[in-house]
Image: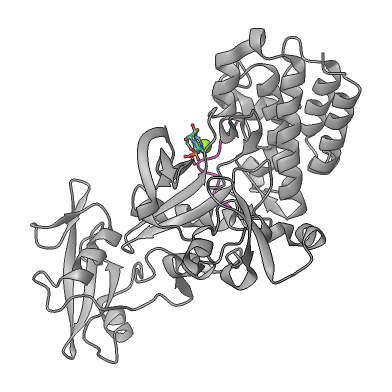
Amino acid sequence: MLWTVHKRAMDLRGFRISMYEKQQKLCKEFKDPNWYKAKNKVGQVGFIPANYVKKREGVKAGTKLSLMPWFHGKITREQAERLLYPPETGLFLVRESTNYPGDYTLCVSCEGKVEHYRIIYKDSKLTIDEEAYFDNLMQLVEHYTNDADGLCTRLMKPKLMEGTVAAQDEFSRSGWTLKMKDLTLLQTIGRGEFGDVMLGDYRGSKVAVKCIKNDATAQAFVAEALVMTQLRHKNLVQLLGVIVEDKSSLFIVTEFMAKGSLVDYLRSRGRSVLGGECLLKFSLDVSEGMEYLEANNFVHRDLAARNVLVSEDNIAKVSDFGLTKEASATQDTGKLPVKWTAPEALREKLFSTKSDVWSFGILLWEIYSFGRVPYPRIALKDVVPRVERGYKMDAPDGCPAIVYELMKQCWHLDPNQRPSFRKLREQLEHIKAKELYQ
Ligand code: ADP
Ligand code: MG
């Protein structure tokens, strides 16, 4: 069976098309490099011409992507006017207001002159004319792009902040955009820091959709999607694509993890349902996902059972790449989960794969205690000082000694003494093979 209709083949993009990373393997099975094996949404397998398939790329690391590339932050009126020179009607930017802190200013070039419109922030809404109100700047810009609605001109061309690329353009260039018309949002399934998570139907498959909340979190949201374009592993929640609608919103679409977060899963089933083999399997799953991040130089920074999700077929996958960065990036320590974060990361912002290993030790403790909150009976403010003095949690009830040994290795105060994820995965595999998990 051959797929011969161009559009049909393109429609398969991103969904179960198996060529991207399996090219090597397939070439062995099917010698002709001009045809690719593909599966459509009802599971039929066929071959499609290679030139009908667009290869997805990871969005280039280091690219400064912005959902609001026309936003220039705190610049003065004069600087804005210089940026909008030479005059071009419809050229615009947004800056933070210097006269009214908290408000913004929309600057538009119009017939040789720059107009400055004050954007008032009122009751969590933005407005210029106190008639039309918007949730965020992207929506406001979208509105005045479609219609001048009282401004001297409609917005026609964004003046881009130097060094930034419009995230929307970059995602479509790299082949990661999906179409809103193919997606039906069904119900809210979670609340995230950067936005709500909804269950959706994308062409007959269940998907999870993270929806952006507001301007303040837009950048973090893009960063998360950006990281996810570069990751592919069976134990990491897979990005399916992003949806950019009208330039004013962004949705991150990922595989749906039917059994929810690992911590809820452990708590709701408990000791009577989940045996030692199952706990070890979750531990091994997470270690494999983390070994992949380690090998690719990504540091997660927020590894915890709440950020591991469980699929319909009980596979644990690491998710929530909101704080994930390539190794070496620095991070503000304000919002860190103290009980999961390595001491050197809390103290000196030293994040590394080895600080993820510390968090993995805490995660193991969570798994073997069926989702208890770490450091029970110790006040939050006392956790860090005690840990710094070498305090380590006891083994959870019924935890095999050999697994508790691994936890303690992860909690070495000297990061260099902690095992790598590769080593941890090997040891967990050994425990599994020898059935030492009882
Ligand atoms: P945050 O970045 O704020 O922590 P998360 O990505 O962890 O947000 O998502 C919040 C919650 O939404 C999760 O704890 C989980 O319950 C739910 N959720 C997130 N992604 C998925 C998914 N792919 N499948 C099912 N539920 C999900
Ligand atoms: Mg989370």
Residue in front for this viewpoint, 168 or 295: 168
Give the residue at x 25% y 89%: 88
Rendered location of residue 103, percent (x, y): 23, 59
Give the residue at x 15% y 70%: 147
Give the residue at x 47% y 57%: 222
Residue in front for this viewpoint, 91 or 388: 91
Numbered disc total: 0
Residue in front for this viewpoint, 106 or 101: 106
Give the residue at x 77% y 19%: 277
Rendered location of residue 161, percent (x, y): 40, 75
Rendered location of residue 82, percent (x, y): 31, 86
Looking at the rendering, which quadrant does residue 51 occupy? bottom right
Instruction: Provide the major secondary structure of the magenta segment.
Output: loop
Image quadrant occupied by the N terminus: bottom right
Residue in front for this viewpoint, 49 or 407: 49
Can you name the residue that lies furthest to the front here?
A: 1
Colour scheme used in the picture? one colour
Residue 163, magenta (yes or no): no
Can you name the residue that lies furthest to the top here?
A: 272
Rendered location of residue 83, percent (x, y): 33, 83
Residue 219 in view: no
Q: Is residue 329 above or below residue 263?
A: below
Q: Is residue 193 above or below residue 171?
A: above
Q: What is the magenta range?
A: 331-338
